[in-house]
Image (tube, helix red, strand yellow):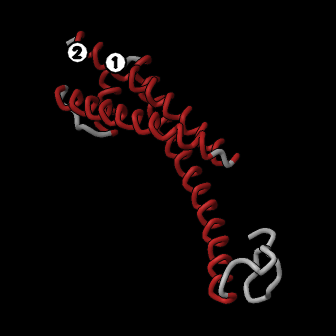
Amino acid sequence: MAAQKNAFIHALVREQSTWLELIEVLHLEEVALLQGDSEKLESLNEPKLTLLQILGKHIHARNTSLTALAFEPSHSGMSAWVSACAEEQVTVLWHRLCEFELDAQSLNKRIGALIDMRLTTTRQALNVLFTCTADQGGLYSNDGMALGPASGRALYAA
C-alpha cells in the first residue's frame, strides 16, 4: 500500500511539472500574440500539443489510480483521497495542481480573447478590401494606388 501511495505521489509531482511547462508555453504564446510574432506562435504549437497530450495521460493515470484506491476518478475523489491521506505534502501538491490548472485555463481564455481580437481586425481589413473590389471594380487605381471603398480615395491603411 505504501509503495502504491508513493508511486501515486511521484506521478502527481510529474503532473505538476508538466502543468508548469504548459503554463510557460502559454505565457510565451500570449506574448507572441501581443507582439504579433507569427513565427514564434507557430513554433509553440507542437510543444503545446505535446504537453496537452502528456497532461491527458497524467490525468488518466491519476483517475485510474484513484479508482484502484476505491475513490471516485474526479476532482472530488482526488480531494477525498488527499483528505484520507492526511499528509501536508500531498495536500500542498494537490492544491498546487488545482492552482496550475486554473492558471492554464485563465491563460487560455486570455489567449482566446487575443486571437479573437486579431481575427476581428483581419475581418475588418478584408471587408474593406472586398468592398473596394465590389464598388470600384478593382483594388487599385491606374497609378497603382489602393482605392478606398466607393470614394476613389487612396487607401493607406485598412
Instruction: Tell me the crowding category of disc 1: few under 14, some 14 to 19, or many 20 or more residues within 10 angstroms, Cα based.
Output: some
In this orientation, which residue lies closer to the viewer: 70 or 138? 138
**Does residue 121 appear left or right of residue 3 in this picture?**
right
Mark 2 closeness class: few <14, some 14–19, many ≥20 residues within 10 Å: few
Residue type at the position of mark 1: Ile
Q: Which quadrant of the figure has residue 131?
A: bottom right
Classify 28 as above or below 142. above
Secondary structure at badge 2 equals helix
Which residue is outermost to the front? 142
Whole-percent x, y for residue 68 in the image = 16, 27
Where does label 2 land, which residue?
4
Query: Would residue 93 appear left or right of 111 to someone viewing this image?
Result: left
User: Toward which corner of the image does residue 55 lie, by quadrant?
Assistant: top left
- Residue 77: x and y in percent read 28, 36
Question: Is the residue under label 1 in contact with that under label 2 (CB below 8 Å)?
Answer: no
Please determine whether, in this image, residue 65 is positioned above or below residue 128: above
Q: Position of residue 88 (x, y in %)?
A: 43, 18
Residue 94: x percent and y percent? Answer: 41, 28
Quadrant containing the C terminus in the rendered view: bottom right
Could one spot residue 95 in this view of the protein? no
**Residue visible at 19% across and 26% down in the picture:** 69
Q: Is residue 26 visible?
A: yes
As rendered, which of 82 and 42 lies closer to the eye? 42
Q: Which residue position holds label 1?
A: 9
Q: Regarding mark 1 in the picture, which secondary structure is present there?
A: helix
Circle 2: residue type: Gln
Q: Earlier in the sequence, mark 2 or mark 1?
A: 2
